[in-house]
């Protein structure tokens, strides 16, 4: 995809060399945008009204580089929704079934699905407690700001709901600790998983968490001094040369292999956390007050009728899904694929699929009709996927 800056100085008239995404204030650029283009981003998706790069060299090359080295990820599109004031904690707790009322230290991060009154998932942020009465909801792709503002108004809460100028940058991959220590000092080693600390860079305190949307290890820097973006990127880039650093982004192959669910793909408002295997983030037996509690308690009591499971598919590498692919057992539709990719590690296509449990379950042989008209033989599996489980036989 071309971006419109490539057409600078040219008349805006068709035909263009390739169709391109028209940018405007609505597709918000950031202090890092220039560096990311210069680093060779080749494909973008739109996330929280911002561009998020999805491919630099190729999905596969980016994947192998990530699991062996270290990458700088431009994830400014993980916007922060700040809740600040005496009712900040109460509002956040109303929004999620995860218990954030007890054992939530300042600097700590908690992954927390947000649900509506039916238990439908609205988003799945990482929540960071940045101060006693101040939380950042580091959101996936939906307008949490509006929901939070509506709840604050409706419940008459004493809380400010804003989207501050914070631009997260992730450092991901097995060499992340080495690179971060070279730029921020040895203190980075003391940051535990899903904890954060304030570390000095050019005389400013920046919030650094051990987190990120891969299972390859790493950090996220919540840059809230936009003017420093270029210096920070350049310092990491230069220090990273000896670690073979590259620019990257959330990688479709890695995240499906690792069992990281994508809001908008693998779960939407039509699904509950119990259907998506996020039970451990639902404190249904705690005395906490959240919207959707009754619905989730009822669903737990009745038992879920469908569940997000793994799916392995034979055949040529698939093209990523842009629509739900129907999963069949014989002639009966039993569910749909939510995300799929070819895994070069396993040599198979791997996917997540929402499966009706009264019709199919783990180990079942199925057929999948892709949006491209292909019929793929598949088998329902555990996820996260493991190599032993993937040594499987397909049958029609
Ligand atoms: N980082 C930040 N914000 C984000 C994401 C991120 N917002 C959107 C999206 N990614 C949220 N999704 C996830 C899903 C899982 C995890 C992080 C973000 C994750 N979970 C831990 C795990 O699976 O081991 C457990 C977390 C916990 O116990 O609380 O890492 O990547 N800033």
Image (cartoon, helix red, strand yellow):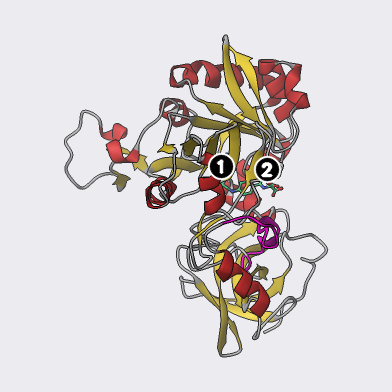
Judge depth for marks 2 and 1 and give the one in front: 1
Q: Secondary structure at mark 2?
A: helix
Q: Which mark is residue 64?
A: 2
The answer for how far apart the CA atoms under marks 2 and 1 are is 40 Å
Badges 2 and 1: C-beta atoms under 8 Å apart?
A: no
Residue matched to label 1: 89
Q: In terms of depth relative to the viewer, which is nearer, 137 or 337?
A: 137
Q: Report the predominant secondary structure element of the magenta stretch.
A: loop
Determine the residue positioned at 29% across, 44% down: 17
Residue 204's place in the image compared with 323, above or below, is: above
Quarter of the image containing the C terminus? Answer: bottom right
Determine the residue positioned at 52% across, 56% down: 263
Quarter of the image containing the N terminus? Answer: top left
Q: Position of residue 275 (x, y in %)?
A: 62, 69
Q: Residue furthest right?
A: 388
| Visible residue check, residue 137 | no
**Is residue 286 part of the magenta span, yes or no?**
yes
Q: Secondary structure at mark 1?
A: helix
Classed neighbour count for the residue bearing mark 1: other residues with Cα under 10 Å, few (<14), some (14–19), many (≥20) = many
Determine the residue positioned at 51% across, 47% down: 91
Classed neighbour count for the residue bearing mark 2: other residues with Cα under 10 Å, few (<14), some (14–19), many (≥20) = some
Q: For ligand 1, tell me if the residue under mark 2 lies within 8 Å.
A: no
The picture quadrant where one finds residue 336 is bottom right
Residue 67's place in the image compared with 301, above or below, is: above
Q: Is residue 214 left or right of residue 40?
A: right
Q: Is residue 107 left or right of residue 21?
A: right
Q: Position of residue 261 (x, y in %)?
A: 60, 56
**Is residue 173 part of the magenta span, yes or no?**
no
Provide the residue span drawn in magenta: 274-289
Q: Position of residue 367 (x, y in %)?
A: 61, 80
């Amino acid at each position: 995809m071309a971006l419109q800056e490539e057409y600078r100085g040219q008349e805006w008239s068709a035909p263009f060399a390739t169709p391109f995404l028209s940018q405007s204030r609505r597709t918000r650029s950031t202090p890092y945008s220039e560096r990311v283009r210069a680093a060779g981003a080749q494909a973008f998706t739109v996330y929280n009204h911002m561009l998020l790069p999805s491919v630099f060299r190729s999905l596969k090359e980016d994947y192998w580089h990530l699991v062996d080295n270290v990458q700088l990820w431009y994830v400014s599109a993980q916007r922060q929704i700040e809740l600040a004031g005496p009712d900040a904690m109460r509002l956040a707790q109303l929004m999620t079934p995860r218990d954030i009322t007890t054992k939530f230290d300042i600097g700590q991060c908690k992954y927390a699905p947000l649900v509506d009154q039916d238990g439908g998932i609205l988003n799945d942020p990482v929540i960071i407690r940045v101060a006693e009465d101040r939380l950042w909801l580091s959101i996936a792709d939906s307008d949490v700001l509006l929901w939070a503002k509506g709840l604050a108004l409706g419940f008459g809460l004493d809380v400010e709901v804003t989207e501050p100028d914070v631009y997260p940058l992730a450092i991901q991959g097995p060499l992340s600790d080495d690179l971060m220590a070279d730029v921020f000092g040895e203190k980075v080693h003391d940051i535990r998983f899903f904890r954060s600390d304030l570390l000095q860079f050019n005389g400013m305190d920046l919030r650094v968490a051990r987190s990120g949307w891969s299972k390859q290890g790493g950090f996220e820097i919540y840059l809230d001094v936009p003017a420093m973006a270029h210096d920070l990127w350049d310092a990491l880039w230069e220090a990273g040369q000896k670690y073979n650093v590259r620019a990257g982004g959330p990688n479709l192959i890695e995240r499906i292999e690792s069992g990281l669910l994508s809001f908008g793909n693998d779960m939407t408002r039509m699904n509950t956390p119990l259907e998506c295997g996020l039970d451990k983030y639902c404190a249904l037996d705690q005395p906490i007050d959240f919207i959707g509690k009754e619905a989730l308690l009822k669903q737990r009591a009745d038992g879920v009728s469908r569940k997000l499971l793994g799916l392995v598919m034979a055949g040529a590498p698939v093209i990523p899904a842009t629509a739900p692919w129907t999963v069949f057992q014989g002639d009966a539709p039993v569910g749909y694929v939510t995300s799929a990719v070819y895994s070069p590690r396993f040599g198979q296509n791997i996917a997540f699929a929402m499966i009706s449990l009264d019709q199919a379950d783990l180990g079942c042989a199925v057929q999948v009709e892709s949006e491209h008209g292909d019929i793929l033989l598949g088998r329902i599996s555990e996820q996260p996927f493991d190599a032993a489980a993937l040594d499987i036989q397909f049958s029609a």
